[in-house]
Image: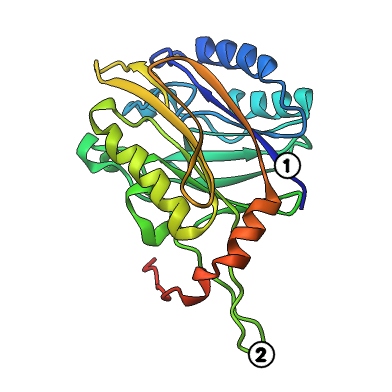
Amino acid sequence: MANLQVALIQTNLHWENKQANIRMFEEKIANAAVKGGLVVLPEMFSTGFSMNPKEFAERMDGPTVTWMKFIAAKHSIILTGSLIIEEEERFFNRLIWMLPTGQYGIYDKRHLFAFAEEDQHYTAGKNRFIASVNGWRINLQVCFDLRFPVWARQRPSVDESGSRGDSEYDLLVYVANWPERRNHAWKTLLQARAIENQCYVVGVNRVGDDGNGIPHSGDSMIVDPMGAIIKTSTNEEAILTAQLDQQLLADIRSKLPFLRDADKFLIEP
């Protein structure tokens, strides 16, 4: 398990303008200089947090997923972020996990933000998605999922002898359009998820006003397994980079084996 390089792209988004956003991210990714690492884009990175899926949804063979394949291969990176996807006449706020080989995984946002009527336009996902790269296990989630700790909770495995493994994943990723007016919750919960799950946490958020005039302060964050902030940025466009240290993670879990005492939770489908 080698160290993992991550880059978070915190930026303003061009409201419901796919072409402008793709051009912008193409330039920013080229400047991120994280060959072989993970690049994380915000929630609905191609449109902003739009409630107009009929107009902006794409299929999985559409131009934005095709662009993600091209960019991941060109820069030898793993690229992730969510966009609006249509499938079987339903719309999803879908996170794409794109490898440089063109292989990909998906996670459909489970907790839809009813306060903004997201649940009226999109279909909720049912399954978590934990990716694996270079020995790292990465739990991928979207924005409002952050408020629901059981959904993110480590679920240690049990082997044939009945012994419990310490952890299910090593890094928890949130992509978001989280408004400035509730940024205290965003910052607090990112650190809480790291502490309670003894994992690194990455949260990437946008800045600037969206098409509804709602301001976003960013506050993107890279947090270590003790809850300490490694990198953060507020109210500005920024690319946050860090090397996640596998030895630090292993040492914390070894010296403080709290996950072994964790409660078991059942998630209703």
Q: Reading the chain from its start, which is encountered first: label 2 or label 1?
A: 1
Left or right of residue 173, residue 7 in this image: right
- Residue 6's x, y, as percent? 64, 34
**Foreground: 83 or 175?**
175
Q: Can the viewer see residue 79 in this picture? A: yes
What residue do we see at 43% from left, 41% from top? 89
Label 2, residues with CA under 10 Å away: few <14, some 14-19, many ≥20 = few
Residue occupied by mark 1: 103
What residue do we see at 45% from left, 29% from top? 44
Tag 2 and tag 1, C-beta contact below 8 Å: no
Which type of secondary structure does the marked residue at label 1 adopt? loop
Left or right of residue 222, residue 28 in this image: right
Q: Residue furthest left?
A: 115
Quarter holding the C terminus is bottom left
Q: Can the viewer see residue 43 in this picture? A: no
Label 1, residues with CA under 10 Å away: few <14, some 14-19, many ≥20 = few
Q: Nearer the viewer, mark 2 or mark 1?
A: 2
Q: Given the image, on which type of amino acid does mark 1 rest?
A: Gln
Calculate the distance from the C-alpha at mark 2 to the C-alpha at mark 1: 35 Å
Q: Looking at the picture, does residue 250 appear above or below residue 174?
A: below
What residue do we see at 72% from left, 38% from top? 99
Which type of secondary structure does the marked residue at label 2 adopt? loop
- Residue 181's x, y, as percent? 23, 28
- Residue 25's x, y, as percent? 58, 17
Which numbered tag is attached to residue 161?
2
